[in-house]
Image (tube, rainbow, N blue to C red):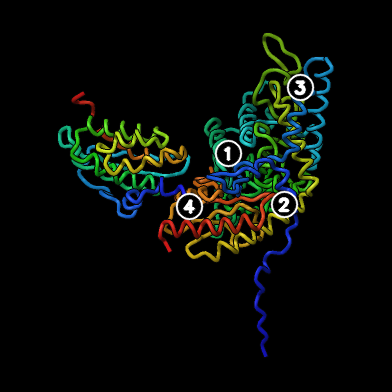
Amino acid sequence: MQLENMYQEIILDHYRNPHGRGLREPFEAEVHHVNPTCGDEVTLRVHLDGDTIADVSYEGMGCSISQASVSAMYDLVIGKTVPQALETGEHFMTLMQAKGDPAVAEKLEDELEDAVAFAGVSKYPARIKCALMSWMALKDASARAWGGSTR
Amino acid sequence: MTVTVSRPVGAQQAPLPLDVEAIRADFPILSRTVRDGKRLVYLDSGATSQKPRSVLDAERWFYENVNAAPHRGAHQLAEEATAAYEAARAAIGAFIGAPEQEIVFTRNTTEAINLVAYALSNAATAKEPEFRTYAVGQGDEIVVTEMEHHANLVPWQQLCERTGATLRWLGLTDDGRLDLSDLTTVINERTKLVAVTQQSNILGTINPLGEITARAHEVGALVLVDGAQSVPHQPVDVTQLGADFLVFSGHKMLGPTGVGVLWGRYDVLDKLPPFLTGGSMIEVVRMERSTFAAPPQRFEAGVPMTAQVIGLAAAVEYLEALGMENVEAHEKAITGYALEKLAEIPGVTVVGPPDTVARGGAVSFTVEGIHPHDVGQVLDDLGIAVRVGHHCAWPVVRRYGVPATTRATFYVHTGYDDIDALADGILAAQKFFGTV
């Protein structure tokens, strides 16, 4: 069975017990992203403390991959500066484009922590967008919150 | 004294109207395997159907023996291509009880609907008075239903935006039917066109078109029937339909992609201005302006999808050999079996009519605690192809309060074994995600 490659236990854990879920105050930007091919949705807020991401709060509906991805992302980006978080997002994108190449996953393991478990998803083109939706929302929201003031 | 007769095991597996094994042998793709050697269980015909060898052969025959642009040139190949193209038009027309001059080839159902929608807005500015007959403008109303595929909703929203007309719609009942309680107010003297699906691509519901067309014609409105999910699966005869337009796609009825059909009553088509303009749809062209050919040529600008039309005629021939009554009966039996099997699985809810009364073979369902994408992924791992998501009918899933559904759709090669595989697959998904 190939399923276990995609649905790593870490992913299922995040899906069943999502970290940081729920919309919270305060926040500087809120975005709503949808995946028009499947109807998955996420509403995501970013709260900055200077350049640092102090909180990411979210609500959404979607498959296990999309819901686990936002939970794993929450763990990764809190406490990072916006540029650091965006760079991590780029690396997650690289992982999603790796077509399951274990070498790519190995290289990114330290930085992506739990999120490296999504390596198996990259073998299923139809599901990559599920894993990426929350990262796209974060990129959008943090750009708005940051307002380009320090760029 | 009461006698209890228990139902014998397997009693529901009455012989099917179609010989599934023989039919499967006609479809080359059904002999391939997927996901590490698993038999392909194809339950996604509602998205696109697989093609029998005779359709593939027909396209190859055309390219190898006849290929030329029809209705252009006078060489032998051009003559033969024109003859083959027009013979296909006649055969496809006969399949739905229509004369050939009422059959317009389009790219697909979507384009056929856009053709009508754009013709109705083009009508407002047409120079030719007869082309203004069906013009839509401010104060006019277009009526759709809440169960339409996006293809039969968005073009009408856009028509209203272009013209200032108002979009209205018939809602849905909790059991997946059209709510006709306000039929006479929604369809009224201001209504210019009613667009309605004959069979819902997500709920499977077969709509009572008679009531709708009767009311529409009472107020002088045109009726467009979306037959994308009905023409492939049940006998459809335009002389009995009571509609002014019927649209359907070749690729959902065993034919090639890239060809669809707009049927229109000739006297209506004749008064519509063109949608796409260019080569071969003209009568006379001068630098200042042009006049247009009679239907159907008026609506077929450019070199048509000739090989695909030939392929669609082969598909029609294949379906006619099976008999559309048999196709319908077969799918009814399969649908009944599927509904029964799904009802036996705790946590599974069918979105749409729960029995086979006025219902076709699109079975959408949810599995408690498992998102449809994840259900689909487990099924895919077992070689079972279904569709997941909103099925291009987003308002429908919203109406029934679910984010998406898993949808199984059936066709002539679907057997009881496919349904058994689906049911086992759902159980496997429940086990995998630990919801049971």
Q: Are marks 4 and 2 in contact (CB under 8 Å)?
A: no
Q: Amino acid at mark 2?
A: Glu
Instruction: Say whether disc 4 or disc 1 marks the residue closer to the N-terminus.
Output: 1
Q: Helix or strand or loop: what does disc 4 sit on?
A: helix
Q: Residue at x 68, y 57 (%)?
A: B332
Residue on which disc 3 sits:
B67
- Nearer to me, A137 or A89: A89
Q: Which mark is residue B375?
A: 4
Chain at tag 1: B
Q: Amino acid at mark 1?
A: Ala
Q: In front: mark 2 or mark 1? A: 2
Q: Is residue A150 above or below residue B366?
A: above
**Could you classify mark 4 by the number of other residues whose Cα lies within 10 Å: few (under 14), some (14-19), or many (20 or more)?**
many
Q: Amino acid at mark 3?
A: Asn
- For the residues beneath circles 2 and 1, the answer to whether they share a chain is yes
**Could you classify mark 2 by the number of other residues whose Cα lies within 10 Å: few (under 14), some (14-19), or many (20 or more)?**
few
C-alpha separation, residue under disc 4 versus residue under disc 1 = 26 Å
Q: Are marks 2 and 1 in contact (CB under 8 Å)?
A: no
Residue B226 appears in view: no
Q: Quadrant of the N terminus of chain B?
A: bottom right
C-alpha separation, residue under disc 3 versus residue under disc 4 = 45 Å
Residue on which disc 1 sits:
B151
